[in-house]
Image: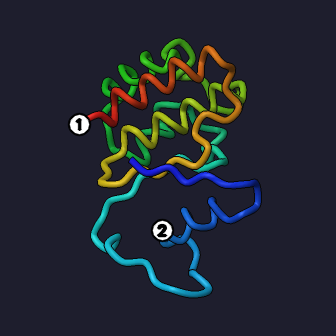
């Protein structure tokens, strides 16, 4: 696990985008990422607002409805999983974005402020799910 910390605007998100190949570096090179499967939790949720949580996750991960629903229960979202994401609160949308990244197949998981917008109690619960899912 590696953590990148710094003041706002210093380029942390830009660095992560370069590592993922979403942006080109002004200078230097990145190596060692060529054949890695990357999953990401971006600062923005990047969800399909007209689709429900299960479909949003399925499109990216290919997981079954049952697998997704089981995981959404861990994220305390199972009761609203069939509603369009546009009806979710900001914290609910954030948890869907986190679930999508965690359920994807990856070698490297990049998280850019993954717990932003969550209240203290939910942050603690979601951090526990993240730790359990990424352990080992």
Q: Residues within 10 Å of mark 1 (few under 14, many from 20)?
A: few
Q: Is residue 34 above or below residue 56?
A: below
Q: Position of residue 37 (x, y in %)?
A: 32, 59
The quarter of the rendered structure image containing the C terminus is top left
**Numbered mark located on residue 53 in the image:** none
In the image shown, does 63 or 1 lie closer to the viewer? 1
Q: Nearer the viewer, residue 91 or 131?
A: 131
Residue 59 left/right relative to 16: left
Q: Which of 70/133 is in front?
A: 133
Total tally of numbered discs in the picture: 2
Instruction: Give me the residue at 61% from left, 14% from top.
Output: 121
Q: Residue at x 56, y 30 (%)?
A: 95
Residue plotted at (32% across, 23% down): 66
- Where residue 117 sits, quadrant-wise, is top right
Mark drawn on residue 19: 2
**Rendered position, 20 above or below 110:** below
Asked which colour scheme the image uses, the reply is rainbow
Outermost residue, left side:
136
* Spot occupied by residue 132 in the image (x, y as percentages of width and height): 34, 26
Separation of disc 1 and disc 2 at Cα? Answer: 23 Å
Q: Could you say where residue 12 lies in the image, as x and y percent from the top left?
A: 63, 60
Question: Splitting the image into 4 quarters, where does residue 61 fall?
Answer: top left
Q: Give the residue pinned by disc 1.
A: 136
Q: Secondary structure at mark 1?
A: loop
| Element assignment for label 2 | helix
- Tell whether label 2 touches label 1 (CB within 8 Å): no
Between disc 1 and disc 2, whose residue precedes?
A: 2
Q: Is 121 above or below relative to 53?
A: above
């Amino acid at each position: 696990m590696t953590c990148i910390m710094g003041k706002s605007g210093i380029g942390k998100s830009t660095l992560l985008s370069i590592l993922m190949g979403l942006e080109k570096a002004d200078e230097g090179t990145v190596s060692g990422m060529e054949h890695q499967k990357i999953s990401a939790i971006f600062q923005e949720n990047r969800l399909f607002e007209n689709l429900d949580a299960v479909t949003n996750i399925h499109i990216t991960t290919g997981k079954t409805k049952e697998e997704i629903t089981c995981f959404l229960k861990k994220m305390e979202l199972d009761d609203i999983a069939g509603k369009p994401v546009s009806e979710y609160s900001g914290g609910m949308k954030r948890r869907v974005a986190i679930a999508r990244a965690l359920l994807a197949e990856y070698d490297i998981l990049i998280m850019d402020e993954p717990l932003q917008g969550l209240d203290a109690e939910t942050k603690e619960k979601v951090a526990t799910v993240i730790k359990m899912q990424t352990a080992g």
